[in-house]
Amino acid sequence: MRLIFLGPPGVGKGTQAQLLCKKYGIPQISTGAMYRQAIKNQTTPGKQAEALMKQGKLMPDFITLGLVKERLQKSDCKNGYLLDGFPRTIPQAEGFDKLLQEMHQKLDAVISISVDEAVLIKRLSGRRSCPKCGAVYHADIHPFSKKGLCDKCHEKLVQREDDKHETIKKRMDVYLTQTVPLLDYYKKKKLLYEVDGDQEIEKVFNSILNLLEK
Ligand code: AMP
């Protein structure tokens, strides 16, 4: 199964991706997580990503495509993969189509999850994560304790730099102008499936499964 998840920041792509990857036994490939790792390691792309992420901007297409290309060569992608946060621009989608051709692979589906902008802003600004184990918390979904510590490793939870209010707005704008055109791109290829993300996690998951197993 080869899948793409599309949707604005905070829509729940990461959560749904984890559930789906577990069910199908495929890796979740998140370009955002790859860039956050590169920032931690202070590599050259990591330093560039740090500056751009703070402003809510995207990394250059050729760097992102190179990163994805390298990741898809790994053996765990043999039976499929789920791309979470990639492609995000038309040139990335076109580059990915070329890559699929080179690898003699076909995409099975593109799942677009949508939620109202006001709900998204509330979700993102309340999101906290553990810098040690990566667990994600949220007041409405997975509440954290008053002390703001991780349940598992008791580390102090942090807010992602790009979940701060000013950056959220910029990320939304970037999504609307650069990523939304992909909906039409994949609709024309008859690969697009749309899901309402403003429901409980389990309901969203079941809607996705119903679409995929139809
Ligand atoms: P995410 O966790 O998917 O919201 O990604 C966090 C940040 O990483 C984005 O705001 C971008 O700066 C960068 N990034 C992630 N995926 C991509 C992509 N496909 N193209 C360009 N930049 C990306």
Image (cartoon, grey):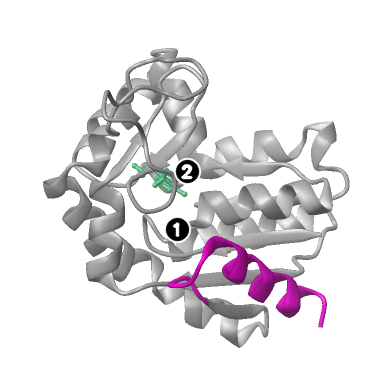
Q: Is residue 24 above or below residue 149?
A: below
Residue 102 image point, x, y percent: 78, 53
Q: Which of disc 1 and disc 2 is earlier in sequence?
A: 2
Residue depicted at x 47% and y 25%: 151
Quarter containing the C terminus: bottom right
Q: Is residue 15 magenta?
A: no
Label 1, on which residue? Answer: 88
Label 2, on which residue? Answer: 62
Front-most of residues 171 and 196? 196
Residue 171 image point, x, y percent: 26, 54
Residue 172 picture quarter? bottom left
Where's ligand 1: which quadrant?
Answer: top left
Q: Magenta span covers which residues?
A: 196-214
Residue 55 image point, x, y percent: 18, 41
Q: Is mark 1 within 8 Å of ligand 1?
A: yes
Q: Is residue 208 magenta?
A: yes
Residue 93 visible: yes
Residue 53 picture quarter? top left
Disc 1 crowd, CA 10 A, few/some/many (<14, 14-19, 20+): many
Q: Is residue 142 above or below residue 188?
A: above
